[in-house]
Every structure is written in C-alpha cells, then in structure tokens.
Amino acid sequence: MKTLLNIIWLVFGGLWLALGYFLAGIVCCLLVITIPWGLASFRIASYTLWPFGRMVVDKPGGNGVFTLLGNVIWLLVAGIWIAIGHVITAFAMAITIIGIPLAIANLKLIPVSLMPLGKQIVPTDRPFVTGYR
C-alpha cells in the first residue's frame, strides 16, 4: 500500500515539490554560509519524493537557539514560498475524491517546510503516517 500511495503521490505533485526543495538546496549550498539550510532542504526533498511510510520527528537535542534562529531565516527566505507550493498542490489534489488523502498528507508537510532545522526523517510501519510528530 505504501508503494502505491508513493507512486500516486510522486506523479500528482511530489516530483515538482521535491524539485522546489532541491532548487532551494542548490541555492543554499552555492552560498557557503547557508549550507545547513541546503542540507536540510535536500533531506526534505527526498522525503517529499517518497513520504508514505516515513515521518518527521524532532532531533534529540536539536531545538537550541541557533536552530530557532536558522528556522526563522529559512522561513523568511524560502520556507514561506515552499509552504505556498504545498497549499497550491493540496488544493489541486483535493479537487478529486481520490486525491483528498494526498492533499491531507501535503498539508501535513507544511510545518517541516516552514521549520526544517532540528528535524529528522524516520521510517514507520504504518503507510498513512506522513504527519509531523
């Protein structure tokens, strides 16, 4: 079931969202100071390609002052635009009945798109867990 959901997700929105994260990661890595944001963006791009069966959790000890400051900078530079992309894609997916679960999963990606630092992606045994815990 996870594989089927991931394939449908990839075709109907996951690929272009992952490309957005990948582009943000490239830009951040070109500017040497923003490499941590680039690495976080690449990590979330891989999660956006294949989200079902994995989930985002807080890193142990990853919620310090520098993480908060980094997340605020990310929010202002790229996070808001990627979150808007998630909302647009969720709206397009929700038009059909089949796409409603994918739209809900897309909306669950918004918190990590806004604040990616201090998070890690872990596997889960449930196919429908794409949420943020």
Image: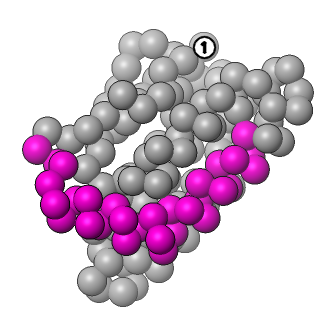
Q: Determine if the magenta segment contains residue 81.
A: yes
The answer to whether 1 is drawn above or below residue 109 in the figure is: above
Residue plotted at (79% across, 36% down) = 93
- x, y percentage for residue 29? 37, 78
Tell me where the magenta segment starts and ends, as one range: 61-90
* Residue 12 visible in this rendered orientation of the protein: no
Residue annotated with mark 1? 1
The answer to whether 110 is drawn above or below residue 53 in the figure is: below
Query: Which residue, as the protein is rendered here, is positioned at the far left?
Result: 61
Q: Nearer the viewer, residue 106 or 1?
A: 106
Residue 91 figure quarter: top right
Amino acid residing under circle 1: Met
Q: Quadrant of the N terminus?
A: top right
Q: Nearer the viewer, residue 66 or 128?
A: 66
The answer to whether 73 is drawn above or below residue 4 in the figure is: below
Residue plotted at (30% across, 55% down) = 117
- x, y percentage for residue 111? 47, 44
Q: Determine if the magenta segment contains residue 12.
A: no
- x, y percentage for residue 68? 26, 59
Query: Which residue, as the protein is rendered here, is positioned at the far right?
Result: 96
- The residue carrying pointer 1 sits among few (fewer than 14), some (14 to 19) or many (20 or more) residues within 10 Å by Cα, namely few
The answer to whether 110 is drawn above or below residue 33 in the figure is: above
Residue plotted at (76% across, 25% down) = 100
Q: Quadrant of the C terminus?
A: top left
Residue plotted at (17% across, 48% down) = 62
- Of helix, strand and loop, which one carries label 1? loop
Q: Taking 52 as reference, is 91 left or right?
A: right
